[in-house]
Image (cartoon, coloured by chain):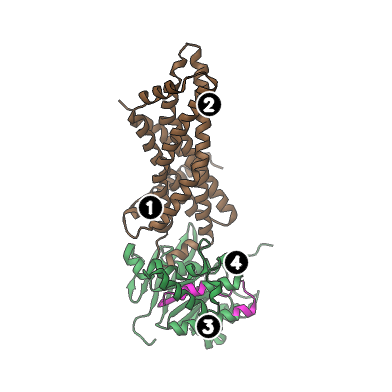
Chain colours: A green, B brown
């Protein structure tokens, strides 16, 4: 690790819903400028982990540090201040359907950063161009766009305020392979431009290999393996082996009733 | 199945819901006074909640006033007391029927719309997206709706009062042989400030209930389309019941001697 304090660090983070334990003591550090991808099957708590860092969910135990500062207890203005460092691309894009495309992209600038509307619109059009969308898209409503275009608008919104940390929740899920690769390239290019630290969660191994510096695997609420992308093929971990090769047989048992 | 365990679970669930609603309301009310306040959103919501409810509230108030006059005339005719129709119509409309009818109609129209809109935003992660864009969802979504409903309802009820009394006037003069000028004079002489103001206070409280139940149920909707549907139904039903219950409490409080 190059810099002393990691950009984002989770220590012993636990979260349960009722009697169901979802996160069972997550320890994970993301170094400054690193692109970490967390892989894991559906329902292993990947989204819950991201939501804990963002403060959308409150962890039951453990600590989360952003730039060395504990953030789980933050509220009010201090939390708003912390949130300005973040950008997030949601799995379903989560665009505001009551606003136009450019208003979506400029939302964080106008509401969170107090940028005047006229200037925010110029920035929005510029960010849309970065994800390959022309200015004619800016005044459309999100419902008029295809899934891939919505994802790109979501990406433009995530990078609009030049965040220091960007989270990607299943960026390629539900897209055709070509559009998925376009999104992967866009993620790599935009992250390089902005110089951000990123955390992505996915179960798409093609995407993970392409965008990650480092990969971590989440299983049963714990990080069971983490290492550089190049080492994933010789992890020596049977769970990781099974996952990256997509085998039905192995130590990971799918709970399927017959 | 142990019957006591089942009852216990129900009681616990009730307490949990009440506590969560209370915390939500507290969160919303404290968000009222802390900046930023989104004035343009408040204005937009006043238009949607207040202005666009005018036709439905006006029509129901008109017919309620009309039928009230008719019933009072038929009833009081037995004692030869039919001259009191204008007074009783005015009292009934301003104190009770104006606020309650407007409250129930707006609950059906607005609480449902709020719950459906916010519920859809919840299940499509739009509310989480607000958080990631450094925007407090309670301030952005709940405060404008609460503010607009609390401001709009008294205005709506003031209009409903006038239209309701006019409904009574129309029926009385057209089919019950009242003289228009005497009807109006009796109404104006009889109604006191307290009759009207008590109705407007009720209206503001009902506005709070309507927006709160819409927002609360929308925020807590789960799953997909079915969850949003359930949230919408719950919003309307709970708002309506709470309006009727609050109406009793407010009446006994406002008119306690």
Q: Are marks 4 and 1 in contact (CB under 8 Å)?
A: no
Depth check: give the residue in front, B56 or A16: B56
Q: Secondary structure at mark 3?
A: helix
Local crowd at mark 2 within 10 Å, few (<14), some, or many (≥20)?
some
Mark on residue A144? 4
Q: Is residue B46 above or below residue A256?
A: above
Q: Are marks 2 and 4 in contact (CB under 8 Å)?
A: no
Depth check: give the residue in front, A143 or A122: A122
Residue under pointer 3: A211
Labels 2 and 3 positioned on one and the same chain: no
Give the residues drawn in magenta, as a range.
A154-180
Give the residue at the far left of this rendering. B257
Residue under pointer 2: B67
Q: Secondary structure at mark 4?
A: helix
Depth check: give the residue in front, A239 or A205: A205
The residue depicted at 39 percent of the width and 86 percent of the height is A1
Q: Position of residue B210 (x, y in %)?
A: 45, 44
Q: Nearer the viewer, mark 4 or mark 1?
A: 4
Disc 4 to disc 1, C-alpha distance: 33 Å
């Amino acid at each position: 690790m190059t810099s002393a304090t990691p950009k984002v660090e989770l220590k012993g983070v636990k979260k349960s819903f009722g009697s169901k334990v979802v996160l069972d003591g997550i320890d994970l550090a993301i170094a400054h400028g690193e692109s970490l991808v967390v892989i894991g099957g559906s329902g292993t708590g990947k989204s819950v982990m991201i939501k804990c860092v963002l403060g959308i969910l409150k962890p039951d135990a453990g600590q989360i540090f952003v730039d060395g500062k504990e953030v789980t207890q933050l509220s009010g203005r201090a939390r708003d201040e912390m949130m300005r460092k973040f950008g997030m691309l949601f799995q379903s894009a989560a665009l505001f359907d009551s606003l136009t495309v450019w208003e979506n992209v400029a939302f964080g600038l106008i509401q969170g950063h107090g940028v005047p509307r006229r200037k925010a619109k110029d920035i929005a059009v510029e960010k849309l161009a970065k994800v390959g969308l022309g200015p004619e898209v800016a005044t459309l409503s999100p419902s008029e766009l295809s899934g891939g275009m919505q994802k790109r608008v979501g990406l433009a919104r995530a990078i609009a305020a030049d965040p220091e940390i960007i989270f990607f929740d299943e960026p390629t899920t539900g897209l055709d392979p070509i559009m998925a690769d376009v999104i992967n390239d866009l993620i790599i290019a935009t992250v390089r431009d902005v110089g951000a630290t990123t955390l992505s969660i996915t179960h798409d191994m093609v995407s993970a290999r392409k965008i990650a510096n480092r990969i971590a695997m989440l299983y049963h609420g714990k990080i069971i393996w983490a290492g550089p992308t190049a080492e994933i093929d010789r992890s020596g971990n049977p769970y990781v082996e099974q996952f990256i090769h997509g085998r039905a047989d192995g130590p990971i048992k799918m709970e399927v009733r017959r | 199945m142990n019957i006591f365990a089942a009852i216990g679970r129900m009681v616990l669930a009730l307490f949990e819901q009440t506590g969560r609603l209370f915390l939500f309301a507290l969160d919303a009310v404290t968000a009222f006074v802390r900046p930023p306040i989104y004035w343009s959103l408040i204005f937009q919501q006043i238009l949607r909640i207040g202005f666009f409810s005018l036709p439905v509230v006006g029509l129901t108030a008109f017919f309620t006033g009309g039928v009230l006059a008719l019933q009072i005339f038929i009833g009081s005719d037995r004692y030869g007391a039919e001259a009191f129709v204008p007074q009783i119509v005015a009292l009934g409309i301003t104190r009770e029927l104006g606020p309650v009818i407007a409250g129930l109609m707006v609950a059906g129209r607005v609480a449902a719309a709020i719950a459906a809109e916010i519920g859809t935003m919840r299940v499509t992660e739009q509310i989480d997206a607000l958080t990631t864009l450094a925007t407090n969802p309670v301030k952005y979504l709940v405060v404008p709706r609460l503010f607009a409903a609390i401001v709009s309802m008294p205005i709506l009820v003031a209009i409903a009062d006038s239209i309701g009394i006019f409904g009574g006037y129309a029926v009385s003069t057209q089919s019950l042989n009242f003289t228009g000028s005497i009807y109006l004079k009796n109404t104006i002489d009889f109604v006191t400030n307290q009759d009207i103001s008590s109705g407007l206070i009720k209206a503001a409280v009902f506005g709070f209930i309507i927006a709160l139940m819409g927002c609360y149920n929308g925020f807590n909707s789960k799953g997909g389309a079915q969850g949003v549907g359930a949230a919408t139904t719950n919003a309307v039903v709970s708002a309506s019941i709470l309006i009727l219950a609050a109406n009793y409490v407010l009446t006994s409080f406002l008119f306690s001697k």
